[in-house]
Amino acid sequence: MYSIVKQIPTGYVATYGDIAILADLPGHARLVGYALHALPPLSDLPWQRVINAQGKISLGKTFPGGELQQRHLLEAEGIVFEANGKINLRHFRWQPKR
């Protein structure tokens, strides 16, 4: 699944569920979240490009301050957050070529 996350281009996002499906693990979005959470702090994997199915950041209490860090990284890539804190998935969702 890490190889799939590496393919998400700058300026785009995918959901945990998207990654699970592409990794042939449909229904295991949480597993994707656990795997990304387990990354070492200096990983070059673009973990910030993976969000929840509602278009929101899902770090919550497990990574204090992580939500702001992820938001800043995504905004630096040109991703725009709506007033409600969501990313417009119709515009920014990565659709890999199959």
Image (cartoon, helix red, strand yellow):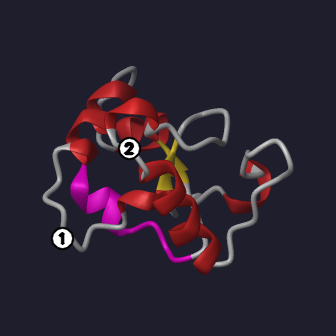
Looking at marks 2 and 1 on the same chain, the residue that comes earlier in the sequence is marked by 1
Q: Residue at x 74, y 46 (%)?
A: 85
- Label 2: few (<14), some (14–19) or many (≥20) C-alpha neighbours in 10 Å: few
Q: Secondary structure at mark 1?
A: loop
How far across and how far down the image is residue 62, in percent? 33, 34
Q: Amino acid at mark 1?
A: Leu
Q: Is residue 48 above or below residue 90?
A: below
Most foreground residue, 61 or 70: 61
How far across and how far down the image is residue 7, in percent? 38, 68
Q: Is residue 60 above or below residue 80?
A: above
| Disc on res. 64 | 2
Most foreground residue, 91 or 72: 72
Q: Secondary structure at mark 2?
A: loop
For the record, the magenta segment spans 1-10
- Label 1: few (<14), some (14–19) or many (≥20) C-alpha neighbours in 10 Å: few
Q: Circles 2 and 1: CB distance less than 8 Å?
A: no
Residue 85 in magenta?
no
Q: Residue at x 24, y 61 (%)?
A: 3
Can residue 24 be seen? no
Question: Which residue sits furthest front?
Answer: 64
How far across and how far down the image is residue 34, in percent? 25, 34
Spatial separation of the CA atoms under disc 2 and disc 1? 17 Å
Q: Which residue is mark 1?
A: 42
Q: Amino acid at mark 2?
A: Pro
Q: Is residue 85 above or below residue 42?
A: above
